[in-house]
Amino acid sequence: GAVIALIGTFVLSYNVGNFLTLGVVLGVAAALTIGIQDFVWKTMVKDVHPVSMNFYRTFASALAVLIYLLATKSFEFVPMSQAPLLLLGAFISPVLGVFLLIKAMANLEVSKVVAIRTIEPFIVVVFAFIFFNTLPDAKELVGGTMIVAGVSVMTLFHHIRARVRGMIGEG
């Protein structure tokens, strides 16, 4: 599964004889960071309220982005006409979406939550089409589908292995 996902990452970052090494490194780093985040959340979800966990995550993310923008001198204000849509987007994903993700982790196994999360890219494609009238090209579809398939295979094998262990432990 991991090999399939990595191949998908390479497909996405290959560009006419030029391999975007930084893109692959950042993609793998993001995947590892998300995995660590999910592990930490699952271990803490019984002791810390989801709203508190989400606040600390959002605060740390906002602080990191602000430091990056100030360090690179690329900070720009958005036009006030875009503020309502910006605020809506800022609420839906990092606040509502993460809150629901943490609640799911409190009630489900991590492998099941990860399986559900693998459909996120397809939902993004639908909303990108609705709001921006854009669709991914063939390379993006193939690479993205391979990444989702790789994660799905890893999740499936983890689930099968857990069931086999449960049957062995019961028998």
Image (cartoon, rainbow, N blue to C red):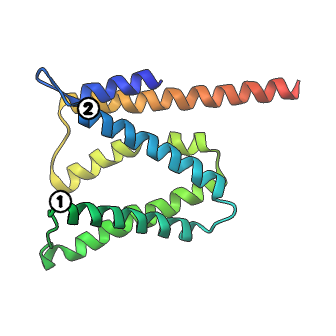
Specify the amino acid type for callout 2: Leu
Residue drawn at 55 percent across, 46 percent down? 113
The image's mark for residue 47 is: none
Between 45 and 153, the residue placed more toward the observer is: 45
Mark 2 to mark 1: distance in Å? 32 Å
Helix, strand or loop for disc 1: helix
Between 62 and 67, the residue placed more toward the observer is: 67
Residue drawn at 52 percent across, 56 percent down? 101
Which residue does the numbered mark 1 point to in the structure image? 72
Helix, strand or loop for disc 2: helix
Depicted 76 relative to depicted 4: above or below: below
| Residue 93 figure quarter | bottom left
Residue 120 % position (x, y): 39, 46
Residue 70 % position (x, y): 21, 66
User: Does any portion of residue 118 appear in the rendered image?
Assistant: no
What quarter of the picture does the C terminus occupy?
A: top right
Relative horizontal placement of residue 161, taking residue 116 as reference (left or right) = right
User: Which circle, 2 or 1, is nearer the viewer?
Assistant: 1
Q: Residues within 10 Å of mark 1 (few under 14, many from 20)?
A: few
Specify the amino acid type for callout 1: Thr
From this viewpoint, which residue is outermost toward the bottom?
80
The image's mark for residue 141 is: 2
| Residue 80 figure quarter | bottom left
